[in-house]
Image (cartoon, rainbow, N blue to C red):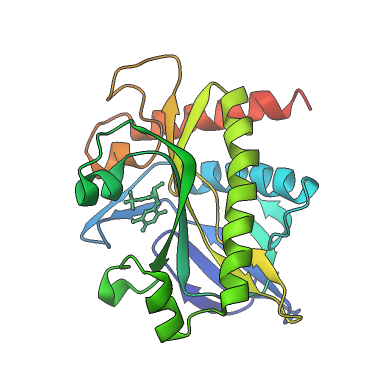
Amino acid sequence: MAGEKLYEGKAKIIYTTDDSAVLLTYFKDDATAFNAQKRGQIADKGKINCAISTYLFQQLEAAGVPTHWLETTSDREMRVKALTIIPLEVVVRNIAAGSLCRQTGLPLGQVINPPLVEFYYKNDDLGDPLLTPDRMRLMALATEEQIETLRRQAEHINQILTAFFASCAITLVDFKLEFGLDADQRILLGDEISPDTCRLWDQSTQDETQRVMDKDRFRQDLGQVEQAYQRVLERVMAQASQH
Ligand code: TMP
């Protein structure tokens, strides 16, 4: 049972429940980009992202990655463990795209090996700036030990997700993770893992526009946004049914 609305974000609403250690996450169809300067809706995105996130959280849990996921209770809602969110966006990059290309001049599509793990400050007013280890220390956003744990978890998650998406004929280009602390100060993976938070390229085409199966279709007005999200879901579910 949903209680009070605790927080409404750009893509999800968080409600309290009758258990203070548990929250309810509701996945909306709203989409934003460029720090909410661009706004829109993607039909059924909430349902698609809820289903994809559910499956990926289950896979990660099975591989020993602790996550906030407890139970998916409807086609847009999941019960999650209440976390104190660490205000960092942890981005893992396997292939150069997006802000990395804009900021470094690396060509789109260049393979990055070993993968890059980056930390951004989760702060909309500041536009989520890229942090350095010294800045993280200065700002006391997390301890050195916590940052090492985040890096190791992100690398482990990348290995699991890269292999899984490859089995769906999808290249995991990059993605963003958020973590939080539970009541025992344990670091758990939070938020969602979906075409909103990952760059996913269809391996069946090399065409730079056609291959995009993620929120870049919305960011860059490439069209066929719903269809791309739906195709990701279909491929994930086809794999899921084989296990
Ligand atoms: P970037 O190239 O724009 O820095 O994005 C890197 C990855 O992080 C990409 O998969 C999209 C994801 N991302 C989010 O999930 N939320 C955000 O606010 C941003 C900027 C990126």
Question: What residue lies at 61% left-to-right and 73% top-to-bottom?
Answer: 146
Tell me what residue is drawn at x 63 percent, y 56 percent: 153
In this picture, is 15 found above or below 192?
A: below
**Left or right: 74, with 178 as reference point:** right
Which residue sits at x=78%, y=52%? 64
Please tell me in which quadrant of the rendered image residue 39 appears.
bottom left
Q: Is residue 8 visible?
A: yes
Q: Is residue 122 left or right of residue 179?
A: left
Question: Which residue is more in the foreground, 105 or 190?
Answer: 105
- Quarter containing the C terminus: top right
The reply to whether residue 75 is visible in this rendering is no
Report the number of numbered marks.
0
Placement of 49 over or under 235, stated as above or below: below
Residue 15: percent from left, percent from top: 59, 73
Residue 154 at what x, y percent from top left? 58, 54
231 lies left or right of 65: left
Q: Position of residue 90 (x, y in %)?
A: 48, 60
Residue 45: x %, y % from top left: 46, 44
Please state if 9 lies on the left or on the right of 103 as rendered: right
Q: Quadrant of the N terminus?
A: bottom right
* Closer to us: 204 or 233: 204
Seen at 48% across and 29% down, the residue is 171
In front here: 66 or 154? 154
